[in-house]
Image (spheres, rainbow, N blue to C red):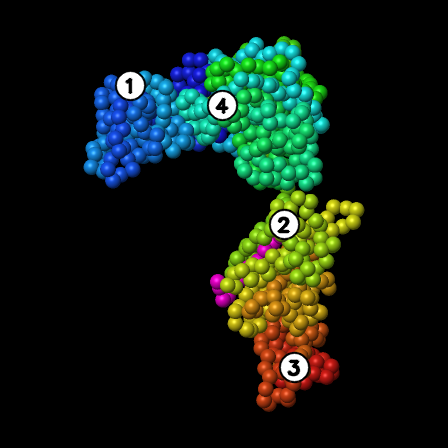
Amino acid sequence: MKFSYNWISELVDGLDVAAADLSNLITLKTAESEGVEKYGAALASVVAARVESAEPIEGSKNVKAAIDAGRLGKKTVVCGAPNCRAGIVTAYVPVGVTLGDGREIRKAVIAGVESEGMLASGAELGLNRDGAGILELQISAGELLGVAVDHIIEIDNKSLTHRPDLWGHHGMAREVSAILRKPLRDPVDLSILPEGAGAIPVSIENFELCPRYSALVIENVTVQPSPLWLQYRLEAIGLNPINNVVDVTNWIMAEIAQPMHAFDADKLHGSIRVRSAVAGEKMGALNGETYELTPSNLVIADDSGAIALAGVIGGAASAISDGTKRIILESANFHAGSVRKTSSSLKLRTDASMRFEKSQDPANTVRGLARAIELLRIVSPGVRVVHGIADVAGPVRQTDPIRLPIGWLNRKLGKELPIIEVRRILEALQFGVGQGSEDVLSITVPTWRATKDISLREDLVEEVGRMIGYSSITPTSPLLPAAVPPTNEERQYLQGLRTLVAAQGFHEVYNYSFLSEETVQHFGFDPELHVKVLNPIATDQGLMRTSLVPGIWKNLVDNSRFSDEFRLFEVGREVHKRSGDLPLEVNHICAAVYFKEPGAQGLFELKRLGECIVPGLELRPAPALLYEHPTRTAEAVYRGEVVGRLFEFHPSMVKGRGSVLDLNIDALMRLCPTETCYTSIRRFPTSAFDLSVIVPERALVGDIQRRLKEFGSETLQTIEYVRQYSGAPLAEGTKSVSYRLTVGAADRTLSSEELGEARTRVIDGMRELGFDLRV
């Protein structure tokens, strides 16, 4: 949002603070200023000049203009504007002046003619956006243009979201007035409003969507370009001058934050109705687009149909044109959510819609009309107001005064303020201040702060605090003892899990929790079992995910185009639909390894990762799902409960080898012991021996390991898989699987007899089960 320093100066009497300093004060006490920019610096040197002659230059489209620049003397200027002719008064830029676009005007020889300066268009001087020809002025040669150098203070829009009053210069001037303790001037004179009934009937279908609609008919209007001072002021704050009628409505919007619209009264049919659009209804807008509307769109309509989108944009059929003689000024108030919904659905943001989305003050509509009458009498002399104002409004919502105990306020602020100072601050901000009791104030919130801003006494603490300056409050320690918050076990576990997996060389990714119906069906999931998003952020994100696998799959597919090998993981929540209850959210970790070349290393690496996460995790073969490899899929089991899956993607899903480990974190946290038992450092040595078991080629090494463990005595400490071998001299279809068994005791060193006994017990037990051993 751009604010003109000159404009604020006109509203705050005696403003004597430089623009840069004022910008800093606004940042400290009101809203974040992003900086100050000088505007129109060249205008101080530009003067009006009369063109005495304009001779064509042979072989060129330019003319040689002899001008009289008054106190600057007579000059010769080469000009290429089509309207450069003898007799007109235009803007002359002398040599040495630098324009706003950075061009420095110098003497130059053009088409063989020496040019001393230039004749400028409104766009070149920053007065408007008309670059088709040089300015045509109605002043005497040698005079200045009547516009002053300005400074533009740019305020961050986000810091004004809760302050609809600050979307106009008068609202910001009110803040400046309170900060500097200077008198505030109200630009609106309500006494000029006409009395009597309105000249056009107005009706409102739903007062929730349109709390107030005010309209005024004005005739004998002359549509023409606005005076330079008006065009310049609008251009300085980023608004495009169009014509005097439209420029007046934009001026009021920028001054008192009340968006307005002007209809050509002779193009309307019948009365004005504020209603919801009919399904399929169409309206051609001022931007040249035609919009198909829905009942969620609020429109202004006459007997012929929609003539404007409420709070967003006017219709082309009733637009102001050069031949307009009678106008209807609309000054209304619309529901913020309705305007936002229409603006978003049609992908159309305007200066008006941005202000209405902040919840404007309904009391401001008639103020806008009063200001319009005053300005139109200046820019279009001879205008006549027809009858009174057509003003239709819903029930006014009364707000109770806020009780503000001064002792409570001081405790919240951390600074003692006398009641007289609190009263002065709030009155400067134009709150109504009454005395509730000896040390309690009764505060009435003004209408422009009551729509979306001030409703609690805590809000008033902020008002007082920002005006005295938070830097004036001495920092003190909290009066209550600070206690360490209770440990969040889930958060602590997840942090440790992320650290562990990242230490194994995996990179963490974050995916959206939403999926498209196509993706869900691609993985064989039922879309009806997914929670549907009522208002999805995109058309392909309408379902809540019930698995992290689709997101990881997309990561693999996308990254496989650039890398031959990588490792990813995500920690997130699955969302499962439950009838009659809120969805069930389950924490999962999904880790993936990708290799472009064939091989089973990805599965083995993820098996090792699973054992790092949960020592003792077992894997068992499982039937493959639609997206899994039919022979490379296993269930992850811990303490007898299935806690996840280890699999490789089906070749049709990924080019290369994409392996995935998906674990249920909530189940692991429930099954893992919450206490860690201390074990002292071993004092006595252990002994180890190797055994090789001859088994069928498809036998599972995990099953063999469990058998070996069954025959181990209490002295058996660990069993470690070493290797497997197939080939000669082994029979075809068999393999040899080798394990290292470690035995030992905590209170002694095992004797050779005890070691031999432990080894024999395992060998004999396995042979009794029919296994052939190589010992």
Task: Specify the amino acid type for callout 1.
Answer: Gly
Of the residues under marks 1 and 4, which one precedes in the sequence? 1
Q: Secondary structure at mark 4?
A: loop
Disc 1 versus disc 3: nearer the observer: 1
Distance between the alpha carbons at the discs numbered 2 and 3 = 50 Å
* Residue at screen point 61% across, 64% down: 660
Q: Which residue is mark 1?
A: 142
Majority SS type along the magenta span? strand
Of the residues under marks 3 and 4, which one precedes in the sequence? 4
Distance between the alpha carbons at the discs numbered 1 and 4 = 29 Å
Magenta-highlighted residues: 562-574
The quarter holding residue 271 reads top right
Distance between the alpha carbons at the discs numbered 1 and 3 = 105 Å
Distance between the alpha carbons at the discs numbered 3 and 4 = 94 Å
The label number, if any, that marks residue 697 in the structure image: 3
* Residue 308: % across, % down: 61, 31
* Residue 72: % across, % down: 24, 21
Does the magenta portion include 9? no
Tell me, yes or no, if residue 138 can be seen here: yes
The label number, if any, that marks residue 539 in the structure image: 2
Task: Specify the amino acid type for callout 3.
Answer: Glu
Distance between the alpha carbons at the discs numbered 4 and 2 = 46 Å
Disc 4 versus disc 2: nearer the observer: 4
Distance between the alpha carbons at the discs numbered 1 and 2 = 63 Å
Q: Is the residue marked by circle 3 packed among few (<14), some (14-19), or many (20+) residues within 10 Å?
A: some
**Is residue 331 left or right of 5 when viewed as pictured?**
right
The quarter holding residue 100 reads top left
Q: Which residue is mark 4?
A: 223
Q: Secondary structure at mark 1?
A: loop
* Residue 14: % across, % down: 42, 13
* Residue at screen point 63% across, 83% down: 735
Q: Is residue 528 above or below residue 562?
A: above
